[in-house]
Structures are given as C-alpha cells and as structure tokens.
Image: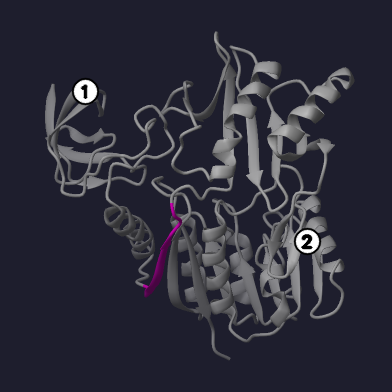
Amino acid sequence: MTTVTIDRLGHLGDGIAATAEGPVFAPRTLPGEVVRGSPERDTLHDIKIDTPSDDRVKPPCPVYNTCGGCAVQHASDAFVTDWKVGIVREALRAHAIDPQFRNVHTSPPASRRRAKLSGRRTKSGAIVGFHGRGSHSLADASRCHVLSPDLTRVIPALQELVGKVGSRKATVEMTVTATQTGLDLDVTGAPPPEAADLGWFAHWARTSGIVRLSWAGEAVLEEAAPRVTFGEYPVTPPPGAFLQATPDGEAALVSAVQGALGGVGKTVDLFGGCGTFALSVLPDRDVHLVEGDAALTTAALDAWKARSGGPILTTETRDLFRNPLDVDDLRTFEAAIIDPPRAGAAAQTQMLADSAVHQIASVSCNPVTFARDARALIDAGFTLDWVDVVDQFRWSTHVELAASFRRDG
C-alpha cells in the first residue's frame, strides 16, 4: 500500500498527489486528504481514506461506486462550484486573461432532460444505464440522481426494449429526451424493427410515453411531434438532435446571451443548432442562424414560419470549420452569438475579430478552447466584460460558460 496526501483536483476529477517519482492520481479523493491504496503505474486503486476532507460528503446516489457518470458526487456543492470556476479561471489565466466572474449557476438534481444511455441483455433480463468508470460494465440508471423523473420512469420500458432487440455481447445505445409532448427516443447499435414487429413497437412506445421512436436518426414511429420551446417558438428537433442538457441550464445560458447582446440589432447565430439562442432572442432583432446540419436549420426555420409577423429569422446550412463566415459575410451584422463544439472555433473567431461586429455573446463547453478564442478577440480590440459559469452536468467534470465581448466603435 502507498500513502499520499492529495494536493489538488485535476480537470478529470481525480485527486493528484505530488511525489518524488511524479504525480500520483487517486480517483474520488479531495485536496488535503491522506489516502492509501495499491499503486498501478501512476494511479492508486482500492483507496482508503485515512484523513477525510471537510468537503467530503456522502454521495446520495446508490450506484455512485459503480457508475462513471458523477466523478465528484463525494464533494460538497460549494467545493464543486469553486473547483469549476477555478477550471475556467486557470484556462483564461494561461492566456493572460483575468475576467470578472458574474454568475455561477448549477442545475438542480433530477433535472437532466436528455441523456445517452446504454443497454445490454443479461441472464435475467436487461440493464440500462451509464458505463462504469473506464469499464464496459453498466450501472442501473433507474435510481439516478441526475436524470429527471420523466427519464428515470422510462428505464423499465427501455430495459424491455433492450431485452427484445439487444444482445449480451454488445450494447444498445439510446438517446432519450423529455419534451413538452412526450419522450423522444433514438436507438443505435441494434437492427431496426422488421415490418412484422411494428405493431409490438407501436404498443410499446404508446404505453411507455414515447411519442417518437427513431433508429439511427430515421423516424420509425411518431404518435406526436416532440416539441421544445425556444422563446415563443415551439420547435420539433430532428431525431437525436443536440439540446441543452437541462431546461434550467438552458434558461441560464439564454439569459446570459440576452444580457450580452443588450439592445444591438441584426445578429448572426453561429453553430446555432435548431434555434436555442436565435429563437430566444428573436423578438428583439432579426437573426441569421448558421449551422452545419440541414435538419437543424430546417427545424428552426419551420418553427419561425409557423408564427408569422415580427422580426425575421433566416438560416444557412454551412460547415463553419471548413468555410467560416468571412469579413464580407459578416458586414451586415452588429452582433454575433457563437456556441461551437468542444474544439472551439479558431477560424471563425478570427473572422469575427477582423470584422466590424462589435458585440459577441459566446457560449462554450470547453474552457481551454474558449480561452484560446477569447485571446484572439481581445487582441483584436474586444473587452471581455464578464463570464458566467453554468454547471448543467451536476457532479460531473464538465463545465460550461457564457461570456460577453464588446468592442467600441
């Protein structure tokens, strides 16, 4: 056994101890704790806590020890909040940026409306849940403290589905979303239903509260259109479409974007998805939504067309990584919203920096690439007014943020 004192928490949630041989990683520990365990390369296993931190709490979830989803459920809420703000702060300081942190918002337990679950047949039936830490094993999600009640209630039905279409050797992957009209389910990793079985699937979906069943993005059955509302606009997202993980977190991000834009006029929404931000800010300005997936832009435009009058929404399907909007494309816009994937948007950010756009509402799920792109904007004369930290993925290592950039003139 090796005994170490934890110095800090890494970005992946592991405690890190400095030793003469180099850093030692200890999962699910906290700074200041004295722990011992069996070393394997640079990681401790079978860890015992000799001196616990004052920030250590009893994890509320009964499958915490086997599930890989909540890396920091053993830490107090105050500690997790400070730690996530620290992740953003250190990423920005690496680029000599020291902003004002305005708000920190954490989604409550049992609020996740969208989740990617895995299922596998077992000897006695089936299991549906999240993968264990670094493991192919699955932890039952029926008592998960993150998922909304709408999602936990459907777990037995998903187990029934996996029992019919799954195997004991491979996992069935399921993206399930709780919408205002019912559950939306997209399945991959199993053969699609045969025509002779559609009656069984239709009955199963109806009794399970699933209004649309899709297989690898193709709708198989649809009893009603799944709907989510952005601003004043009900939207039917395409199967498996990205949505913010919690309504609560979405509201915090939308509020931040609205605050960052203020009263500016015509706005471009880059990486706009199916209109989360564009439709939410539309009552105050015309918006041009740009997104690489035509199904998403179509969903946003259809929602806008269904409510005539008011400001105008236009859309464009365009790969902003390979073909970012250039200075000429941006010349008619006063402001921009940008919400790129984890890789950030270096090329598109540089075009914004070179353009006449003077207000930017930035949303990011990766503090490192956000900090890189923020540096390019600041070097071009923008001021980073504030940063909001939004923790939608409670008890996980993920952190999201929204920020306001302004340039005079």
Q: Which mark is residue 300?
A: 2
Could you tell me the amino acid type at mark 2?
Ala
Above or below, 287 relative to 41: below
Give me the C-alpha separation between circle 2 and circle 1.
52 Å
Q: Position of residue 235 (x, y in %)?
A: 76, 58
Above or below, 59 relative to 196: below
Q: Which residues are magenta?
A: 99-108
Q: Position of residue 303 (x, y in %)?
A: 81, 63
Q: Residues within 10 Å of mark 2 (few under 14, many from 20)?
A: many
User: Is residue 380 shown to the viewer in this render?
Assistant: no
The residue located at (67%, 82%) in the rendering is 334
Q: Position of residue 219 (x, y in %)?
A: 82, 37
**What kind of element bears circle 2?**
helix
Could you tell me the amino acid type at mark 1?
Pro
Q: For residue 355, what is the image quadrant?
A: bottom right
The residue located at (57%, 57%) in the rendering is 247
Q: Main secondary structure of the magenta part?
A: strand
Q: Which mark is residue 39?
A: 1
Residue 103 part of the magenta-drawn span: yes
